[in-house]
Amino acid sequence: MKRLTKSEIIFKILAYILIGLFSIMALYPVVYAFSASISGKIPYEAGKVVLLPKELNFQVYKLIYEDKGFWISYVNSLFYTTYGTAWSMLISITGAYALSKKRLLFRRQLNFFVVFTMWFNAGMVPMYLNYVNMGVANKWGIIVAFGVQAYNIILLRNYFEGVPHEIEEAATIDGATEFQMIRSIYIPMSKAAIATVTLFYATSRWNGYFWARMLLTDPMELNMQVYMRILVENYQKMFDDMPIDLPYAADSYIFAILVCSIIPVLIVYPYIQQYFAKGVNLGGVKG
């Protein structure tokens, strides 16, 4: 076993210290939000809740359980994330596969147009008017209209270009169609990149706020991010109408919803994280 030099030991110690500090900085807001959501009104308003909860009180979670608006928006977010991510991956995988093939007619021009959209766009107001005129101001429109991102297509394209050409030639000789090659060769050999892009799309869909707020007018179609924003804008008025001697603070309800909103991400992310760094590195090497 190779002995570490003094400089290497110092570097490792500093690296672990920095990683530990960044981990604490990333974890603290989540811990504080959960502690504030289950703390009593008096210690919270007195500023005594710093890390651990004080005077445990879970009534805000009972309120969330009885809040139909929250559950409607929660289900809507799951719907947008599930179907939106599936649609985005379908378009991205097929598009990236086509753009990775040198035999594609006008391949260079098409690749340029994809990259061009990363540099320039029409602007927010023309995009909004375009979406409205196209009739996408509904839940299915949100899914279809925001189907792809140029960066993710390029990431997958670069990864697909790294698949050995000999494998595709062998599959062609065996009579495999384009879709069979995508399903049986490219997708199994590109799990890291596909998992990474899936994570990008899923988090974008789950956290989507701006265009959902701009385009969705039916309260039954609002996602959770928009619902939380509306709640933040009106929660003080809502709690002013309640009894004064509540055992929890008004902010505790907001913190409880924030905690509930990150649960799906905390559940899914550990399973995808193992592919994340590998997918970005391998897919982003080529130009």
Image (cartoon, rainbow, N blue to C red):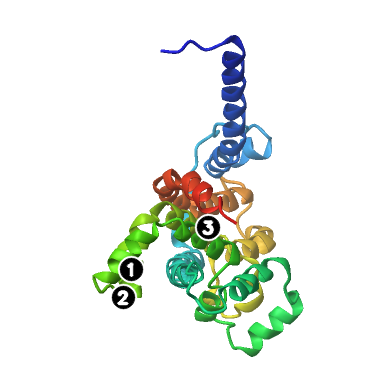
Q: Tell me the residue at 28%/67% (across/down).
A: 171
Q: Tell me the residue at 59%/36% (across/down).
A: 28
Which amino acid, by three-letter code, is at mark 2? Answer: Thr
At mark 3, the secondary structure is helix
Q: Tell me the residue at 41%/57% (across/down).
A: 163
Q: What residue sits right under mark 2 in the picture?
A: 177
**Residue 102: image location, x then y, percent:** 50, 70
Q: What residue sits right under mark 3 in the picture?
A: 200
Mark 1: give few (<14), some (14-19) or many (20+) Cα within 10 Å: some
Mark 2: give few (<14), some (14-19) or many (20+) Cα within 10 Å: few
Instruction: Verify CB contact (< 8 Å) between mark 1 and mark 2.
Output: yes
**Residue 187: image location, x then y, percent:** 36, 61
Q: Where is 24 relative to 259, above or below?
A: above
Q: Where is 34 relative to 134, above or below?
A: above
- Give left or right: position of 47 versus 4: right
> Could you say which quadrant of the image residue 224 lies in?
bottom right
> Could you say which quadrant of the image residue 240 lies in?
bottom right
Mark 3: give few (<14), some (14-19) or many (20+) Cα within 10 Å: some
Which amino acid, by three-letter code, is at mark 3? Answer: Phe
Q: What residue sits right under mark 1 in the picture?
A: 181
Q: Is residue 237 visible?
A: no
Q: Which mark is residue 129?
A: none
Residue furthest toward the left? Answer: 174
Which amino acid, by three-letter code, is at mark 1? Answer: Met
**Residue 107: image location, x then y, percent:** 56, 74
